[in-house]
Image (tube, helix red, strand yellow):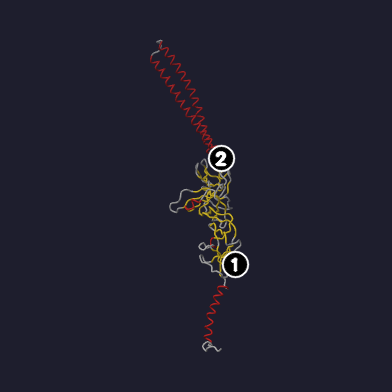
Amino acid sequence: MKLPEFIQKPLFRRLALVPLAVLLLVAGVLFVVPTNALGATVNRGPVSLDVRGTGTLESVQEVPLAFKVGGRILELPLDEGSPISKGQVLGRLDPNDLQEQLAVAQAARGAAQAGIGKAQADMEQARATQQRAHSDFERVKRLQAEGILSRADLDAAQERLKITDATVQAVGAAGTQARSGESQAKGTEALQRLAFEEGRLLSPVDGLLTRRLREPGNIVGAGTPVLTVVSTRKLWVRAWVDETSLGALRVGQLAQVELRSHPGQVFPGRVDRIGRQADRQTHELLVDVELLQLPAGFAVGQRADVRIGVAGKTDALRVPNAYFDRKNSTCAVKKGGRIHQVDVKPGFAGSDFVEIQAGLQPGDQVLRSLEEGKALPSLRRVQVKGEL
């Protein structure tokens, strides 16, 4: 049969081929050109619901160190950041200055002892004079009664006796003062001797020297802070967490700590203390998480992030949260090189993973779009650009 003349024209033939080309292009896009996606392997592992917070690394015990007596610092051998041991010598005072102070204290004690000796000699002399005055008074009193001496002689003898009594009292008070001065001088000498023998700073803890507040050559008074040390017996992160987490937190819960100085490394921790005073502006409260393992290098006061596991399962079939469609309870799965939407039964939902109770098997590869929140088209070929 002969076709109509207009169909036989070349232009009509070219136009008739356009829909066919479009269909072939669409088919190529759907079934030949792959869609890029991110992938993750379904596996077994812990599914944990976490409380998260950010804080600073602190020591439970921070100790300022000071000399017990004043003097010139001779040496401070360690720099900031140096590890220290309990009982280690961290500083010394100049022994020459201490020797001079000890010599002054010894001289003061010697003068006090000399004062005691003089007071004792004066007391012996005063008592002897008092005894003679007393004997003279009794003799004059007897002779005046016999009419041999006058009343004026008796009054004079009595006055001499009163003077000797007052002298004995004054010498006794001087002796008491001298003994008190000796006791004080002995105490000062003992303190200066101790300072001379122990004019040094000893570390009270095992830990780190964190601050040098004075330098060799400085003159310091007794009790003036010179160094600051911290104990490494217990270090914790004082982390701020949202107040809504308070009901789930318990002392002893295990945690993970990531220090900003060690990105990507996770250190084990444990909740040691839970604050009960929330900030009225941020509505956060402090939780102290003890580090159970210390890194090789750290600094007190540095920032850290904590994750406290408050609930979960230790062994569950799981997929990352980003690969699970909560609205439809489905996962995009790679099968035969193509995308298939698979119905799944979710279980416990954690902070990073969700438990899958049915619908997937270990080793399945779940997928998600490179664009956040965008669904992957079913049955399209897929090319995995990154895998978790």
Residue depicted at x 54% and y 77%: 23
**Amino acid type, label 2:** Glu
Residue ID for mark 1:
335
Q: Residue furthest top?
A: 146
- Looking at the image, which is closer to me, 5 or 336? 5
Q: Residue furthest left?
A: 151
Q: Residues within 10 Å of mark 2 (few under 14, many from 20)?
A: some
- Quadrant in which the N terminus is drawn: bottom right
Count of picture labels: 2
Q: Residues within 10 Å of mark 1 (few under 14, many from 20)?
A: some
Residue 103 on image: x %, y %: 53, 36
**Amino acid type, label 1:** Lys
Residue 293 on image: x %, y %: 58, 51
Q: Residue furthest front?
A: 1
Nearer to us of marks 2 and 1 is 1
Q: Secondary structure at mark 1?
A: strand
- Quadrant in which the C terminus is drawn: bottom right
C-beta proximity under 8 Å, tags 2 and 1: no
- Looking at the image, which is closer to me, 68 or 71? 68
Q: Is residue 277 above or below residue 335?
A: above
In which quarter of the view is residue 137 placed? top left
Residue ID for mark 2:
198
Q: CA distance from mark 2 to mark 1?
A: 79 Å
Q: Is residue 143 above or below residue 276?
A: above
Q: Secondary structure at mark 2?
A: loop
